[in-house]
Image (cartoon, rainbow, N blue to C red):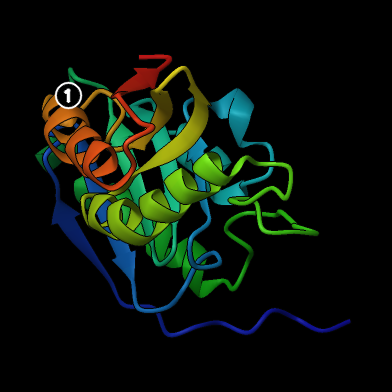
């Protein structure tokens, strides 16, 4: 039986607009480009051994994984100065072990569905090309949920969930872009907020 090779891991922390979230950035890809995983609680993290381990820390409120980073959202009553190095060291040690961060297989691209209408395909394309890279820089994701009667509904994930500036991002950024590029879109709303 082969043993997992230990990796050379460089990990640094980045602040983002959500004061309760911190982005831990690795020097290699953790999951496929354009795919993200949001774990709002331990029960949802069964496919992520790393997220499950992080939820063992009582200060952890949410874990998000995308491209080359893990965003940890802490509980409000905890200061980053108390936990950030503990989280960083734990994530670094986990990544050095060579274990999978998320155990998920896709038979097809999870972003696109051949049954989508042309408008939905365009919305998803705009979200993927223009919005995803910018939002990932802040440690989060905004994922398409639905489109009906001119209203696009999205899910806020990672640091975007509970972020004080998410409403501004949603209305001033995403809604303005989508309504300008697609006349069929009249409004953008966050689902489940």
Whole-percent x and y of residue 114? Answer: 73, 50
- Residue at 52% x, 27% y: name it: 146
Q: Secondary structure at mark 1?
A: helix
Q: Quadrant of the N terminus?
A: bottom right
- Residue at 69% x, 47% y: name it: 113
Whole-percent x and y of residue 129? Answer: 36, 61
Q: Please identify the quarter of the rendering in which residue 185 is found.
A: top left
- Residue at 10% x, 41% y: name it: 81
Q: Where does label 1 land, which residue?
A: 167
**Is 78 left, or right, of 86 in this rendering?**
left
Q: Nearer the viewer, residue 189 or 68?
A: 189
Q: Residues within 10 Å of mark 1 (few under 14, many from 20)?
A: some
Image vertical order of residue 189 relative to residue 63, above or below? above
Image vertical order of residue 182 relative to residue 11, above or below? above
Q: Quadrant of the C terminus?
A: top left
Q: Please identify the quarter of the rendering in which residue 80 is found.
A: top left
**Number of numbered discs visible in the structure rendering:** 1
Image vertical order of residue 98 relative to residue 167, above or below? below
| Residue reaching furthest to the right | 1
**Is 86 left, or right, of 102 in this rendering?**
left
Whole-percent x and y of residue 87? Answer: 32, 49
**Is 109 left, or right, of 35 in this rendering?**
right
Q: Nearer the viewer, residue 116 or 138?
A: 116
Q: Nearer the viewer, residue 120 or 107?
A: 120
Whole-percent x and y of residue 175? Answer: 23, 33
Asked whether residue 109 appears in the rendered view, the answer is: yes
Asked whether residue 79 appears in the rendered view, the answer is: no
């Amino acid at each position: 039986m082969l043993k997992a090779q230990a990796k050379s891991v460089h990990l640094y922390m980045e602040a983002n607009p959500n004061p309760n979230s911190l982005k831990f950035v690795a020097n290699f890809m953790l999951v496929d480009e354009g795919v993200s995983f949001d774990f709002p609680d331990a029960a949802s993290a069964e496919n992520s051994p790393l997220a499950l381990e992080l939820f063992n820390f009582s200060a952890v409120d949410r874990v998000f994984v995308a491209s080359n980073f893990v965003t940890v959202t802490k509980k409000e009553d905890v200061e980053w100065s108390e936990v950030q190095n503990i989280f960083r060291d734990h994530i670094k040690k986990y990544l050095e072990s060579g274990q999978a961060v998320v155990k998920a297989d896709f038979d097809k691209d999870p972003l696109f569905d051949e049954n989508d209408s042309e408008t939905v395909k365009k919305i998803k394309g705009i979200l993927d090309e223009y919005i995803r890279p910018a939002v990932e820089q802040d440690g989060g994701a905004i994922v398409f949920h639905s489109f009906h009667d001119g209203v696009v509904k999205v899910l806020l994930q990672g640091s975007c969930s509970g972020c004080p500036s998410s409403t501004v991002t949603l209305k001033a950024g995403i809604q303005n872009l989508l309504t300008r590029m697609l006349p069929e879109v009249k409004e953008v709303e966050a689902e489940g907020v």
